[in-house]
Image (spheres, rainbow, N blue to C red):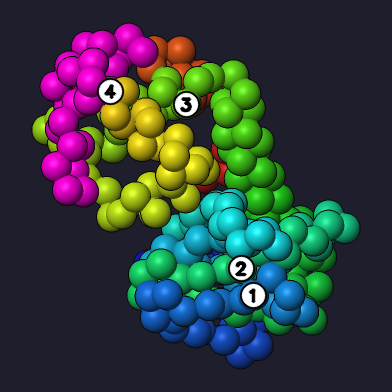
Amino acid sequence: MKMKDICIYNNIKEYLDEINIIDYHKGQYISTGDENLESMFFILSGVVKVECITKEGKTFLVDILYENEFVGKISEIYDQNLFCDIIATSEARLLKINKDTFKKLQKNPEFLNIFFFKTSKRIYNMYKKLIMKDLFRFDELFASYILENCDDNIFKFKSVYNLCKMLSTSRKNLYNTINKFISKGYILKRDNSIIILNKKTLIELSYYVKEFRQKNTEEFKFNIF
């Protein structure tokens, strides 16, 4: 994405000499959970993930972010600290807005409108995901996920480890569900691919998940773009 195409360009253009553009390689840490980060980032291109690691070493995926989104220790703005790592999952280019410049931008109502809209929308989406884990069984969620991400009835995944992180579940739970679907004739598994054999049943199984995840299409909604 070109600088002039980002949603905050008109707000930051007078501060461009104070803002750095930084390139990150795939797998490179942008920030660690224990780091005292005094900057806010804005993604120009690439994909970034936010994850948390427990004391037991379990990794929990918090969010995945794309271009035109803010990333940083946003929780600290709300007097919290989630101790999350921020990692580039592809080649990425980010704007680094230092603390002093960010304070100047906070005096601009239009900038604040964009910032809080984007961050609060993500918080709501994360909250919705947590609710879904309580409302639905994992087999319903898994059926919905593979249907949404399949191509010609074939769902491809990077690795079981990666899939567990995306679905926030254990390997045991994932394998049990996959084996259950195989035994019922819903799917076939070949290496890192899942072939859907009974799409109709999976659609029925995931019906209420899809209904719950359906986005609001009404005109009565807050939209700044």
User: Which mark's residue is nearer the viewer, 3 or 1?
Assistant: 3
The circle on residue 148 is none
Q: Amino acid at mark 4?
A: Phe
N-terminal-most mark, 4 or 1:
1
Work out whether residue 131 or residue 221 is closer to the camera in this orientation and state it: 131
Residue under numbered circle 2: 85
N-terminal-most mark, 3 or 4:
3
Q: Where is residue 95, by image quadrant?
A: bottom right
Location of the N terminus by quadrant is: bottom left
Q: Circle 3: is it few (<14), some (14-19), or many (20+) Cα within 10 Å?
A: some
Q: Circle 2: is it few (<14), some (14-19), or many (20+) Cα within 10 Å?
A: many
Q: Position of residue 204 (x, y in %)?
A: 32, 9
Residue at image position (44%, 83%) is 23
N-terminal-most mark, 2 or 4:
2
Work out whether residue 126 or residue 182 is closer to the camera in this orientation and state it: 182
Residue at image position (46%, 71%) is 88
Q: CA distance from mark 2 to mark 4?
A: 34 Å
- In reply to whether residue 171 is colored magenta, the answer given is no
The circle on residue 32 is 1
Secondary structure beneath label 1: loop
The residue range painted magenta reads 181-205
N-terminal-most mark, 3 or 1:
1
N-terminal-most mark, 2 or 1:
1
Residue at image position (61%, 68%) is 85
Q: Is residue 110 visible?
A: no
Residue under numbered circle 4: 181
